[in-house]
Image (spheres, coloured by chain):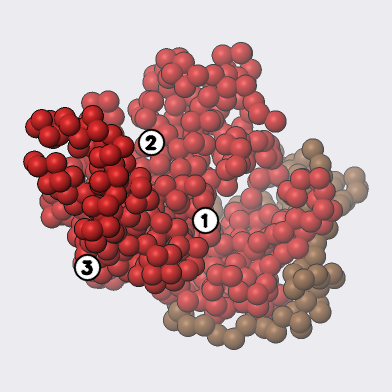
Chain colours: A brown, B red
Amino acid sequence: MSAISRDDVAHLASLARIELTEQELNDYAGQLDVILTAVASISEVAADDIPPTTHAVPVVNVFRDDVVTPSLDRDSVLDHAPAAEDGRFRVPRILDEE
Amino acid sequence: MSAPLIDFDEVIANFDPVLGLEVHVELGTASKMFCGCATEFGADPNTQVCPTCLGLPGSLPVVNGTAVESAIRIGLALNCSIASWCRFARKNYFYPDMPKNFQTSQYDEPICYEGYLDVDVETDEGTRTFRVEIERAHMEEDTGKSLHVGGSTGRIHGADFSLVDYNRAGIPLIEIVTKPVEGAGKYAPEVAKAYVGALRELLRGLGVSDVKMEQGSLRCDVNLSLRASADAPLGTRTETKNVNSLRSVERAIRYEMQRQAALLTDGTAIIQETRHWHEDTGVTTSGRVKSDAEDYRYFPEPDLVPVAPSAEWIEQLRAQLPEPPAERSKRLREEWGISEKEMQSVINAGALDLVLATIAEGADPAASRKWWLGELARRANDEGVELESLAITAKQVADLEGLVQSGRLNDKLARQVIDGVLAGEGEPAAVADSRGLQIVSDDSALLEAIKAAIEADPDAAQKIRDGKVAAAGALVGSVMKATKGQADAARVRELVLQELGQ
């Protein structure tokens, strides 16, 4: 049985807002299956006493002090937005009328 | 549009409610969770943003150590276990309130888990303690604020476009989730309110948040389901958002119980959905239906390293916790000589700190409670705000009580002074001066009014002369009326009796 179905890929594509053609769905399902199966072989050799690797560098508790640092200038921030109004980012309609 | 409801008593006769509460607390840190931007409430839009909280390419988060400390302190105060090792996770979704397209949160490794908070609720059989079990408390970041423009309702549905302010995006948030609360029965609304109230006191006592519900630094989502009986399987739940006051917590649950019961009685299934509470109309309306669009594809945040608080650190924080609210309330109850029920009403009104502050400013405990729970609670209720948001300070209330104690004002005049203070006319003494409020203490002025009252009601006067001093009430009343309440009623009574030879 494959690790990922064509329907799974279609579902993920829709969650990720990526438009895929029928051909792409088939191609990616096959390719992703190869990758997932390869990755799954790691868990076959990893015994229960080996904790999952979380980070390339084995450190914990990297914290900064609760100190305010300067923020960006608003105009220069909004200059990069596709649209802005009243000091805010202007975004298209989020939900349609029900 | 309001849904059909059935009578609350009928709901209780036929159904068993199960509650779940999710409370989001904005921490009062100076800077955000993962960057150094300020967290000031009410700043100009998008003036507290940087590459990290805007999700710009190449930016990297670094955890605010104080926020982690606050999270642990909250967990300890809620009797939780603290994870010795946990990670952040990405919660992926597309929505403009999060410019990164994910929220950094925690998933299956919350920093705090399995605790409880005991809350007291008044029942027909006296005060009963309910234990609300805490499933988890985890760290995450707040989202931006959207302003929906155009459309018919000003709400998100059908708006023409939205304007987003990311000042709030990235402010540290602790989400506290209860286990299903069962067995509350008809007290479910009160238990929920008492829990949020007790949690607010606890957080305030820890000093980790300003816990202002109307400013959104404490927010509550209410999950509710009904089942036929306590041993039946759990029913389908709804999640009601936008419940932004203690009073709303109670009302929203009561409403959902009545609405769901009406549907179930009618044979209609409950839809699992997010609902929106409307404070003004007291109803909930349907938001979005939970669907697979809420498949968040959590995965461990690769840009952050794990949080692994040492046992020493945890014990050090535990040792520094303030007096737990339950113990503090017991101690104050004994100091003030009041009942558990009276204390509960102080806490539920969110008045404990205000009362304490008023006492610290010199008023006595009984008077402090009287003002905050009586006249001021009424004003807050009328204005639909929390007590602490009223435009009057503890010092002003103490000063007002001082004016009453010194005999300058009676309670009626004091209420007029409150009008003035709330209207921004200045300090209590200045308001009393400018409004000319002062008990008439000049006996000759009072005697004149008393003589007039006696003349107007000779029957009452005769009764008093015959020894029926209880009849004095009528004459005192008319003198108070004649002096527009500006007389000291006790003094008037003395003078009336004296005048009539008693």
Which image quadrant for residue B500?
Answer: top left
Q: Residue at x 57, y 62 (%)?
A: B142
Q: Residue at x 62, y 21 (%)?
A: B4
Q: Nearer the viewer, mark 3 or mark 1?
A: 3
Q: Which residue is disc 1 drawn over? A: B214
Q: Is residue B6 shown left or right of residue B397? A: right
Tell me how far mark 2 sits from mark 1, CA to CA. 20 Å
Dot 2 crowding, Cα within 10 Å, few <14, some 14–19, many 20+? many
Residue A54 position (above or below residue B95): below
The earlier-in-sequence mark between 3 and 1 is: 1
Q: Chain of mark 3?
A: B
Expressed as whole percent of the image width and height from the top left, the position of residue A38 reads 66, 55
The earlier-in-sequence mark between 3 and 2 is: 2
Tell me how far mark 3 sits from mark 2, CA to CA. 33 Å
Q: Is residue B488 shown left or right of residue B140? A: left
Q: Secondary structure at mark 3?
A: loop
Q: Which mark is residue A85?
A: none
Q: Secondary structure at mark 1?
A: helix
Q: Residue at x 27, y 63 (%)?
A: B408
Expressed as whole percent of the image width and height from the top left, the position of residue B5 reads 57, 22
Expressed as whole percent of the image width and height from the top left, the position of residue B468 reads 12, 30
Amino acid at pointer 1: Glu
Q: Which residue is disc 3 drawn over? A: B362
Q: Which mark is residue B190?
A: 2
Q: Is residue B248 shown left or right of residue B480? A: right
Q: Is residue B231 shown left or right of residue B314? A: right
Q: In which quadrant is the C terminus of chain A drawn?
A: top right
